[in-house]
Image (tube, rainbow, N blue to C red):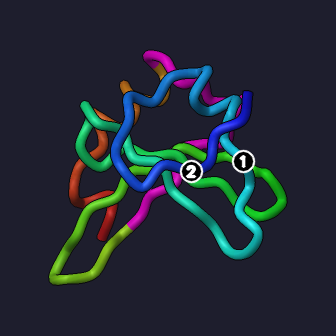
Amino acid sequence: MSTLVSALPVRITKSVVDRLIAPKAGQAFTRDSKLKGFAVRITTSGAKSFILEKRIDGKVKRLTLGRYPELTVGKEAKGTASHNTTKSLR
């Protein structure tokens, strides 16, 4: 079963990431419903990356944590996201 990228936040799990479909153009984001700022970015080529994003001075800043499947959905990705600070995004 395949899943389009969600406009609404969802709990990001391995099965959710595995089912994401690449967008026809550009990139798309699926945001986590529990961990604010944590998301998965998927490109037209199908590359999936975990990101941390924050709005600073009215602009969205994004930090790439790592590519999937090299970085897993579990403790590694969310642990990295919870330990990053706003300084990393500036």
Q: Considering only order in the chain, which callout, 2 or 1, is on the residue closer to the N terminus?
A: 2
**What is the x, y in percent for residue 9?**
34, 44
- Which residue position is annotated with label 2? 5
Could you tell me the amino acid type at mark 2? Val
- Quadrant into which the N terminus falls: top right
Of 42 and 60, the residue lying toward us:
42
Q: Which residues are magenta?
A: 62-75
| Vertical side of 79 occupied by 35: above or below | below
The residue at the far left in this view is 57
User: What residue appears at the point 68 percent right and 74 percent down from the top-left corner?
Assistant: 26
Q: Secondary structure at mark 1?
A: loop
- Which residue position is annotated with label 1? 21
User: What residue appears at the point 62 percent right and 48 percent down from the top-left corner?
Assistant: 4
Q: Answer with left or right where residue 19 lies relative to residue 44.
A: left
Residue density around tag 1, few if under 14, some if 14–19, many if 20 or more, within 10 Å = some
**What is the x, y in percent for residue 62?**
41, 64
| Vertical side of 66 occupied by 87: above or below | below
Residue density around tag 2, few if under 14, some if 14–19, many if 20 or more, within 10 Å = many
User: What residue appears at the point 26 percent right and 62 percent down from the top-left corner?
Assistant: 54
**What is the x, y in percent for residue 37?**
29, 49
Of 55 and 26, the residue lying toward us:
26
Label 2 near label 1: C-beta < 8 Å?
Answer: yes
Could you tell me the amino acid type at mark 1? Ile
